[in-house]
Each structure stands twice: as C-alpha cells, then as structure tokens.
Amino acid sequence: MKYQDAAWLSTDGIPRKDHVSMNHPLVSQLRFTRSEFLRAVKGVADDDARQRILPMNCISWNIGHLAWHTITSAADPWLDTLTSARLQKHVISNGRQIAPTCGNLLQRVIYHYWYHIGENLAIRQQLGHTHLPQFVGAIDSKAPYRPEKS
C-alpha cells in the first residue's frame, strides 16, 4: 500500500513547522497521531493488509474505517481554524446540542487512532513482520507540548 503524505507533512513525514505553531495544540497532536498511524502501516503489502486475524479487523479495514487520506486531508483547513473557544463548544447534531464538546470529540479521534495503531502493529506481529515501531515516534520534535495561545 502506498499512502501519500498530507499537505501538513513535509516530504520526510514530519508535520511542517508552519502548521505546528499556527494551529491549536490538540490539532498538532492529531496530526502527529496521523503520522504515527502511517508509520505503523508503512511497507505493508496489499495481501497482508487484507488478512484478518480474528477477532481483529484487517489492516485495510482499519485504514478505511479511519477514512484515511481523502477525508482527513479535506478536514485539515477546518482543523487549522480551531480555537480553544470553539473546542469548548458543544456539538450540534440534528439541530440539537449534544453533550460532547468539539474538543472531547477531537480527543476521541486521537485516542481512536492510537487504538488502531496498536491493533495494526499486533496484526503485523502475527503476520511475522519485523523491525516494527516499538514506541511512540519523535513526539518531542514533531509534536512537542506547547501551551495554548492566550
């Protein structure tokens, strides 16, 4: 499988500096998580991606489930507009306010990615793949902690 990098990534897969400093810190964490998702499936052959090891889904299903690339790229301009105030607002669904805030849902997406990163790496281990990522990547340089802008 070959995945193209999104506009927010440099050619080496690192989130571009102009995106890291301009957006909300939670958006930077989402983008870092997406890059880790790509790292977890890098080099997976199509046949391996389609193999299902029960009770887990196959890697290709996980990629589709996370609506990878087209939809995530389309969301990037909207993500760049998020502010702390917007993330604290409740979501409107079917014309009604629901309990989660935008920030809660963004966190849910980030954690959901991490769930599938672990699942994909477990599948790859079962398939006998070697030299897999062993730990979270270079978060200190790619998505370091930074406080929200006041």
Image (cartoon, rainbow, N blue to C red):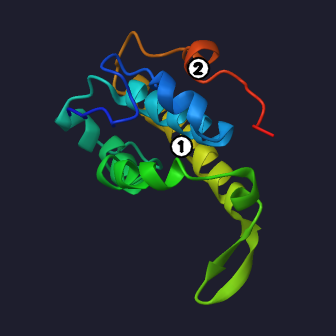
For the N terminus, the image quarter is top left
What amino acid does circle 2 point to?
A: Val
Task: Name above or below for residue 85 compared with residue 130.
Answer: below
Residue under the point 18% across and 36% down? 47
Given the current orientation, which residue lies at the most extreme bottom position? 95
The label number, if any, that marks residue 136 in the structure image: 2
The percent coordinates of residue 145 (x first, y second) are 72, 24
> In terms of secondary structure, where does tag 2 sit?
loop
Q: Residues within 10 Å of mark 1 (few under 14, many from 20)?
A: many
The percent coordinates of residue 44 (x first, y second) are 27, 28
The tally of labels here is 2
Frontmost residue, 61 versus 106? 106
Residue under the point 64% across and 79% down? 92
Q: Quadrant of residue 5?
A: top left
What amino acid does circle 1 point to?
A: Tyr
Q: CA distance from mark 2 to mark 1?
A: 13 Å
Residue 88 in view, yes or no: yes
Q: Residues within 10 Å of mark 2 (few under 14, many from 20)?
A: few
Q: Quadrant of residue 123?
A: top left
Residue under the point 56% across and 52% down? 81
Residue 121 in view, yes or no: no
For the C terminus, the image quarter is top right
**Is 114 situated left or right of 78 in this image?**
right
The percent coordinates of residue 117 (x first, y second) are 50, 35
Residue under the point 67% across and 62% down? 102
> In terms of secondary structure, where does tag 1 sit?
helix
The label number, if any, that marks residue 113 in the structure image: 1
Frontmost residue, 33 versus 142? 142
Do residues under tags 2 and 1 come within 8 Å of each other at their CB atoms?
Answer: no
Frontmost residue, 140 versus 83? 83
The percent coordinates of residue 100 (x first, y second) are 74, 68
